Amino acid sequence: MIIRHRIRAILFPVLLLAVSGSVTSYFVWHAVNGQRGTKAKDEYSAQMEVLQVERSQLLKEKASLERRVAMLRGKTVDRELVEEEARLVLGRVHKNDVMIFLEKGN
């Protein structure tokens, strides 16, 4: 009888510690590796930096295009810009233009 009581007194705390340790380790593992864990947060931060760089490049391109459109819209139109656009659309060149042909890889 005393032996059973002593075994229960030892086994119950050991089992309780094992179960609580496994539950705690489950939650810790998911906090680090889970869908919303710290690793996912680092991946999202890296992806956000890449997207911010791309956004800044697109904003620069947008400003450049807006400047070109402003030159075409005003009361006075920039002749060189109109001529350049016409050549691009028509696929023609001026007789005084210098043509440089590059290989396809460049």
Image (cartoon, grey):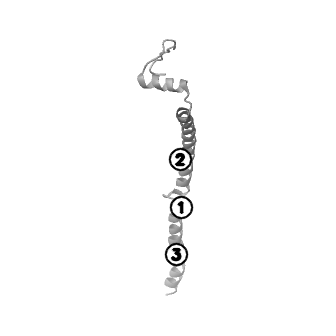
* Vertical comparison of 44 with 79: above or below: below
Residue extending furthest toward the front? 75
Q: Pointer 1: residues within 10 angstroms few (<14), some, or many (20+)?
A: some
Tell me the CA gap for discs 1 and 3.
23 Å
Mark with earlier residue (3, 2): 3
In the rendered image, residue 49, in percent from the top left (x then y), is placed at 57, 46
Residue depicted at x 48% and y 26%: 85
The amino acid type of the residue labelled 2 equals: Gln
- SS category of the residue bearing label 1: helix
Between 6 and 77, the one lying in front of the other is 77
In the rendered image, residue 89, in percent from the top left (x then y), is placed at 43, 26
Mark with earlier residue (1, 3): 3
Give residue 43's mark: none
Asked where in the image residue 50 lies, by quadrant, the reply is: top right
Tell me the CA gap for discs 3 and 2.
42 Å
Pointer 2 residue: 47
Pointer 3 residue: 16
In the rendered image, residue 91, in percent from the top left (x then y), is placed at 42, 21
Q: In the image, which is nearer the foreground, mark 3 or mark 2? A: 2
- Tell me, yes or no, whether the two marked residues, 3 and 2, touch with CB atoms within 8 Å: no
Tell me the CA gap for discs 2 and 1.
20 Å
Pointer 1 residue: 31
The amino acid type of the residue labelled 3 equals: Leu
Residue depicted at x 52% and y 70%: 18
* Vertical comparison of 69 with 97: above or below: below
- Tell me, yes or no, whether the two marked residues, 2 and 1, touch with CB atoms within 8 Å: no
- SS category of the residue bearing label 2: helix
Between 106 and 38, the one lying in front of the other is 106
Between 29 and 17, the one lying in front of the other is 29
The amino acid type of the residue labelled 1 equals: Ala
- SS category of the residue bearing label 3: helix
Asked where in the image residue 13 lies, by quadrant, the reply is: bottom right
